[in-house]
Image (spheres, helix red, strand yellow):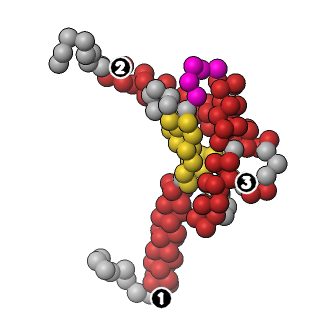
Amino acid sequence: MTRNQRRTTRAQDRRRHERNARLGETLREVIAEELAKLDDDRLTMVTITTVEVDSEMNHGVVYFDSLQGSDGDGKIVEVLGEYRKRLQHEIAVQVKSRRTPVLQFKPDETMRAAARIDAVLREDARRRAEREAAGGSTPSAE
């Protein structure tokens, strides 16, 4: 390690992570408020789930979910891209930081994965209930 390089401690890393989490939540609130103000039918029922920001606040990834599902993701990304500069401007005005991150929009796969897992678990529970109702014992390994 050279003389000018510093080691970061766990406490410094934790504070940086907490700061990024707070900043991400603030940006999520600002972006969600601004989207609610827009009168664009293409963004009906779009929810901003999380915003991840790098430590220098150069880039921000905005994750969204919608009732349109994965079929509407491309269109929503395109529409959000049209409003990107306006959203960045509002972030600069409301957050009052030296830098405003360049926003990128991505669908939030977390919610969809959770829904798929839930559907699998419900189907498994339904099958087990049917087997028990039919009087059969549940096999130990399938």
The residue lying at 61 percent from left, 67 percent from top is: 71
Crowd band around label 2 with a 10 angstrom C-alpha radius: few (<14), some (14–19), many (20+): few
- Magenta span: chief secondary structure: loop
Residue 130 at x, y percent in the picture: 50, 83
Residue with the mark numbered 2: 11
Would you place residue 12 above or below residue 42 in this image? above
First in residue order: circle 2 vs circle 3: 2
* Residue at the left extreme of this rendering: 1
In the rendered image, which residue does mark 1 sit on? 134
Q: Alpha carbon of mark 1 to alpha carbon of mark 2: how far?
A: 58 Å
Any mark on residue 53, and which? none
Query: At label 2, which amino acid type do we have?
Result: Ala
Residue at the location (52% across, 42% down)?
61
Q: Nearer the viewer, mark 3 or mark 1?
A: 3
First in residue order: circle 1 vs circle 2: 2
Q: Nearer the viewer, residue 58 or 48?
A: 58
Residue 96 drawn at (x, y percent): 64, 20
Farthest residue to the top: give it.
Answer: 3
Q: Which residues are magenta?
A: 96-100
Q: Residue at x 29, y 76 (%)?
A: 140
Q: Can residue 94 be seen by looking at this rendering?
A: yes
